[in-house]
Amino acid sequence: MMKWMAALVLSTAPALAADVVSYDTDQSFDDVTFGLENAIIDAGLVVDHISHVGEMLERTREDVGSDVVLYDQADVYSFCSAQLSRQVMEADPMNIMFCPYDIFVMVRHDAPETTTIGFRAFPEGEMQTIHELLDGLARAAIGME
């Protein structure tokens, strides 16, 4: 219960930077990813793919000549909604560029006590339906919904 309360206090306002919506919490990476997976399933959606970005960057760090550790953990969850995708693509077939939809979860190496969950912001218009979906999933994952 205390972790949820701390997460709520830390996450009451989304951070908007470079068209990204993100929320910080003191919950563990595993708790947030578990919450995200459950939120996606509860919405009747299926995770298509999990990109282990943090592992890939760490595995290839020396190969590309870097000594910078970016993340302790970082994954990107990809999924789609047949119903909502059809709705936004019927409004504009070019909205295909936004699919699949992604939500990231990360623990930055320089801030190991904070887990961040977020997604790329979507443009005004019909894509706000997807923006609201992703925001609801991210917030549900950390107990804000």
Image (tube, rainbow, N blue to C red):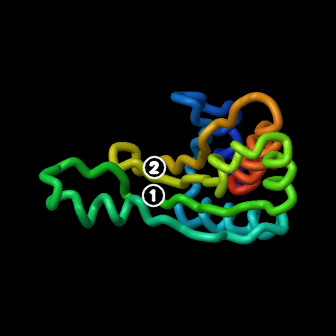
Q: What element carries label 2?
A: loop
> Residue at 70% of width from left, 31% of height from top?
123
**Residue that numbered label 1 is attached to:** 74
Circles 1 and 2 in contact, beta carbons < 8 Å: no
Q: Decide if residue 31 is on the left or right side of residue 59.
A: right
Check residue 113 in the rendering and tell me which mark sits there, or answer none.
2
Q: What element carries label 1?
A: strand
> Residue at 23% of width from left, 62% of height from top?
60
Amino acid under label 2? Glu
Compared to residue 54, the image places residue 10 above or below, namely: above
The quadrant holding residue 121 is top right
Compared to residue 139, the image places residue 13 above or below, namely: above
Residue 145 image position (x, y, % from top left):
82, 49
Q: Decide if residue 131 is on the left or right side of residue 55.
A: right
Could one spot residue 3 in this view of the protein? no
Front one among 7 and 121: 121
Residue 85 image position (x, y, % from top left):
79, 54
> Residue at 49% of width from left, 65% of height from top?
51
The quadrant holding residue 64 is bottom left
Check residue 89 in the rendering and tell me which mark sits there, or answer none.
none
Name the image quarter holding the N terminus.
Answer: bottom right
Compared to residue 12, the image places residue 63 above or below, namely: below
Foreground mark, 1 or 2, reads 1
Q: Decide if residue 3 is on the left or right side of residue 72.
A: right
Front one among 114 and 141: 141
* Total numbered circles: 2
Amino acid under label 1? Ala
Front one among 96 and 13: 96
> Residue at 26% of width from left, 66% of height from top?
59
Residue 26 image position (x, y, % from top left):
56, 49
Front one among 112 and 60: 60
Question: How far apart are labels 1 and 2 at the CA level?
Answer: 14 Å
